Image (tube, grey):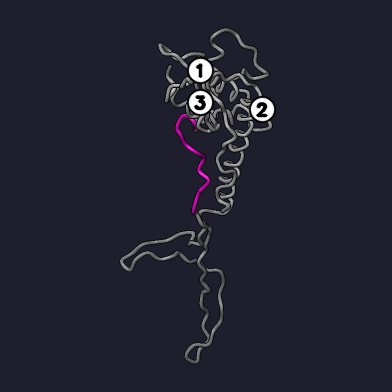
Amino acid sequence: MSMQGRISRAGGTKLKRALGVQAALEWAFRVEKAQLELPPPKDVVEEGFGFGLEYVLMQRAALGCKVDGGQHKMGSYTHADAEVIAATVAGMPDSLGGIRMAIRVAELARAGMTPDWMPGVVPRCVPVETRQNQHGVRAVTEVIGTERVLSRGKWRMINILACPVTWRPHPEQIASARRGYEDWWQALDWVRDGLVVGRMLREVEVTTVMPKMRPWKR
């Protein structure tokens, strides 16, 4: 059996391996290399083998990531519990992101990663553009108007300069990254509930342990 840390037995009673949902997903997709079976699109009729390959290629092009196809690994065994976990992920409802979220959950688990919610990032006010010369790096300014001033007994017209600034990263970028993390968390919560209620896992027990819902809030 390929599960890390073989399931132990005590007095002839099999003990299930307890894993939080994120650990269970990483075991299924990273260790067992389970395949993510994508459902066919509603508006396309499947016509033999060609459709499956075409659809996978369409998803790769649209989503910019690798999508697994096929039911079994070539020449190796995928644990039945891992296949159940993968099938549960593939059934992600549209309200939580559907196929796109299923792929994201699977690929993050395969990489052993958590979505980047930009920890520790603080927006900073910086010049829109800078230039470097022998005197160092300086902010680029632009003329926003003119003013008539009295200088040495004469009226002169001078340019009023301003330095355009922006926020980097923009607060909306940080907010977007954190919304993405929350969407992923909701998807994991749904997978956890499905695995617990379904009671189809034979050697793995999915616990209530979850990643922090909003790790940026201390």
Amino acid type of disc 1? Gly
- Closest to the camera, between mark 3 and mark 1, is 3
Q: Position of residue 136 (x, y in %)?
A: 34, 66
**Comes first in the chain, label 2 or label 1:** 1
Taking 59 as reference, is 126 above or below it? below
- The residue most toward the bottom is 153
Left or right side of 65 for 93: right
**Comes first in the chain, label 3 or label 2:** 3
- The residue most toward the top is 48
Q: Residues within 10 Å of mark 1 (few under 14, many from 20)?
A: some
Which residue position is annotated with label 1?
Answer: 69
Asked whether disc 3 touches disc 1, contact meaning CB atoms under 8 Å apart, the reply is no
Taking 39 as reference, is 191 above or below it? below
Identify the residue at horizontal 55%, vertical 18% (top origin). 202
Q: Residues within 10 Å of mark 3 (few under 14, many from 20)?
A: some
- SS at mark 3 in the image: strand
Amino acid type of disc 2? Pro
Q: Position of residue 135 (x, y in %)?
A: 33, 68
Which residue position is annotated with label 2?
Answer: 93
Identify the residue at horizontal 46%, vertical 29% (top origin). 110
- SS at mark 2 in the image: loop
**Comes first in the chain, label 3 or label 1:** 3
Q: Main secondary structure of the magenta part?
A: loop
Left or right side of 169 for 2: left
Q: Residues within 10 Å of mark 2 (few under 14, many from 20)?
A: some
Task: State yes or no: residue 149 in magenta.
Answer: no
- SS at mark 1 in the image: loop
Q: CA distance from mark 3 to mark 2?
A: 27 Å
Q: Which residues are magenta?
A: 109-120
Which residue position is annotated with label 3?
Answer: 17
Task: Name the one closer to the observer, 210 or 94.
Answer: 210
Q: CA distance from mark 2 to mark 1?
A: 20 Å
